[in-house]
């Protein structure tokens, strides 16, 4: 299900029935991956130490649940006599089933890596042509998550070749007898965001990230997909035109996070975490969680910002770029509250005034309303905001404000248009209904009815309030 704004007036809720329906990634997945810190230098102690740190630190309580083993986990020389992949006994002496059991015992889930090719990116055996055998093996080990890369594609690099390779693994996972979240990693090639929704739970939309804010790198083109050593701003600017391609069960993946890396300032890390959350990218940590600072932990567990990812908000969209300033927005499903994100990619602090005509374009009623504005990083509350808001945004920083209509404001209720798209074979049937929600009383169907920080209705009209995660319960 996806929320989309038309001119920031009417709110469209789109339920895409042909999205991958495996019951997973209903919210963007959260967890940790070995690659950014350890590369190929992994073993079972690496995995268990990270899993224990996620539990002991409390990261698990914020929703981080997947512990993903990236490349280099198997025997490099090949498969066993039955054709199965073999976990390297020098790295994983107790085997993958044992390791999965240990991770599960901590209340976490475990992920594995392969490639839709003849070899992985590091030259280990991969899964092209062996999809069902490998999926069955992973399921027997208790694997919960697959990161599926794009190296050594066997000459199948066209869009149809990509579709065929990634569909084959989707079908194999579906037959393996265990729910396994499917994270596609084809680096944004072949316009993956246009065809991946029925295939994967997430899809990488760019080349590999590096812990750099905005430096150009010849390995990562500014406009085309693929590559490596991509900066935060490079990926973010590529994500802007396609942000709404992600929705329930299938998300644009902006790559693993680099929060916690010393090459980034605290403000750069806050900007990074804010934008990955607001665009609803998977939130997969990549730092050494066994040695993280209190500042890193505070960023990664900020409830206000996590709510942009895991809560009720629609996917953020970019309103404009003006020199080093970008304006992004997220809207609540009842089209009442608005999150406004002002990003400063420049090298100096900026004080600026944002008129309501920029935020509530083509909506004179909202432009003339009065708002209570809460800055989500500082929890600073400004009452009776009218016409415009003046803010200061730090260099390489972000300002995140939640706009809530003041009591008596003419925008305290709204109309929501709901469009349901149902695909059956080659036929698409669309139906449209219109509901009205208010800031008091029972919530309407599909509306939020609970969660951390939620102050609205907790009962439902003609439906039941159902728990989804700590940040979101919904009337269904």
Image (cartoon, rainbow, N blue to C red):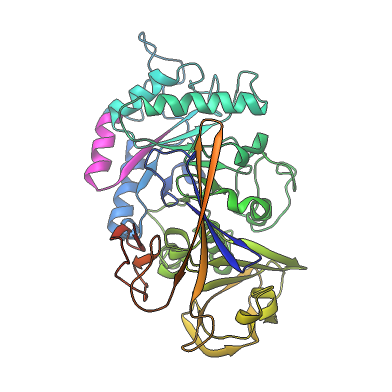
Q: Position of residue 336 (x, y in %)?
A: 50, 74
Magenta stretch containing residue 71, yes or no? no
Classify residue 345 as left or right of residue 90: right
Residue at coordinates 51% horizontally, 20% vertically from top-left?
128
Q: Is residue 11 visible?
A: yes
Res 354 quadrant in image: bottom right
Q: Quadrant of the C terminus?
A: bottom left
- The single residue placed furthest to the right in the displayed view is 323
The residue segment tinted magenta is: 96-112
Above or below, 161 against 364 in this view is above
Q: Position of residue 78 (x, y in %)?
A: 45, 15
Which residue is at the front of the view, 412 or 40?
Answer: 412
Res 69 quadrant in image: top left
Above or below, 282 against 441 in this view is above
Which residue is at the front of the view, 312 or 301?
Answer: 312
Magenta stretch containing residue 103, yes or no? yes
Which residue is at the front of the view, 16 or 198?
Answer: 16
Q: Position of residue 379 (x, y in %)?
A: 46, 80
Residue at coordinates 29% horizontally, 28% vertically from top-left?
141
């Amino acid at each position: 299900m996806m929320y989309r704004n038309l001119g920031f007036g009417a709110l469209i809720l789109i339920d895409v029935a042909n999205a991958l329906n495996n019951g997973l990634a209903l919210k963007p997945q959260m967890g940790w991956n070995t690659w950014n810190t350890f590369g190929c230098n992994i073993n079972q102690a690496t995995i268990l130490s990270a899993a224990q740190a996620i539990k002991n630190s409390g990261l698990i309580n914020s929703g981080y649940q997947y512990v993903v083993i990236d490349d280099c986990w198997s025997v490099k020389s090949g498969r066993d006599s039955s054709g199965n992949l073999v976990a390297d006994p020098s790295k994983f002496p107790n085997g993958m089933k044992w390791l999965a059991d240990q991770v599960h015992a901590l209340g976490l889930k475990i992920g594995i890596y392969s490639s839709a090719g003849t070899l992985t990116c590091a030259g280990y055996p991969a899964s092209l042509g062996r999809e069902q055998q490998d999926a069955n093996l992973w399921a027997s080990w208790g694997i919960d998550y697959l990161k599926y890369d794009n190296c050594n594609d066997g000459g199948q690099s066209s869009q149809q070749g990509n579709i065929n390779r990634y569909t084959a693994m989707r079908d194999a996972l579906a037959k393996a007898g265990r729910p396994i979240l499917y994270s596609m990693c084809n680096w944004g090639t072949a316009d993956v965001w246009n065809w991946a929704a029925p295939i994967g739970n997430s899809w990488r939309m760019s080349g590999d990230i590096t812990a750099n804010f905005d430096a150009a790198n010849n390995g990562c083109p500014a406009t085309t997909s693929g590559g490596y050593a991509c900066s935060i701003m490079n990926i973010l600017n590529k994500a802007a035109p396609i942000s709404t391609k992600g929705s329930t069960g299938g998300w644009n993946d902006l790559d693993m996070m680099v929060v916690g890396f010393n090459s980034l300032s605290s403000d750069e890390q806050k900007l990074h975490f804010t934008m990955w959350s607001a665009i609803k990218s998977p939130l997969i940590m990549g730092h050494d969680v066994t040695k993280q600072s209190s500042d890193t932990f505070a960023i990664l567990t900020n409830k206000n910002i996590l709510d942009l990812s895991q809560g009720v908000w629609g996917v953020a969209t970019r309103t404009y770029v003006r020199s080093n300033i970008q304006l992004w927005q997220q809207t609540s499903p009842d089209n009442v509250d608005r999150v406004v994100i002002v990003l400063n990619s420049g090298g100096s602090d900026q004080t600026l005034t944002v008129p309501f005509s920029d935020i509530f374009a083509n909506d004179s009623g909202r432009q003339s309303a009065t708002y209570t504005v809460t800055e989500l990083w500082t929890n600073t509350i400004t009452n009776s905001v009218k016409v415009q808001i003046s803010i200061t945004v730090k260099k390489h920083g972000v300002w995140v404000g939640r706009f809530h209509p003041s009591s008596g404001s003419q925008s305290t209720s709204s109309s929501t248009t709901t469009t349901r798209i149902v695909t059956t074979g080659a036929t698409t049937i669309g139906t449209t209904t219109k509901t009205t929600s208010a800031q008091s009383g029972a919530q309407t169907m599909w509306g939020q009815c609970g969660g951390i920080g939620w102050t609205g209705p907790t009962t439902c009209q003609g439906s039941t309030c159902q728990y989804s995660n700590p940040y979101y319960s919904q009337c269904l």
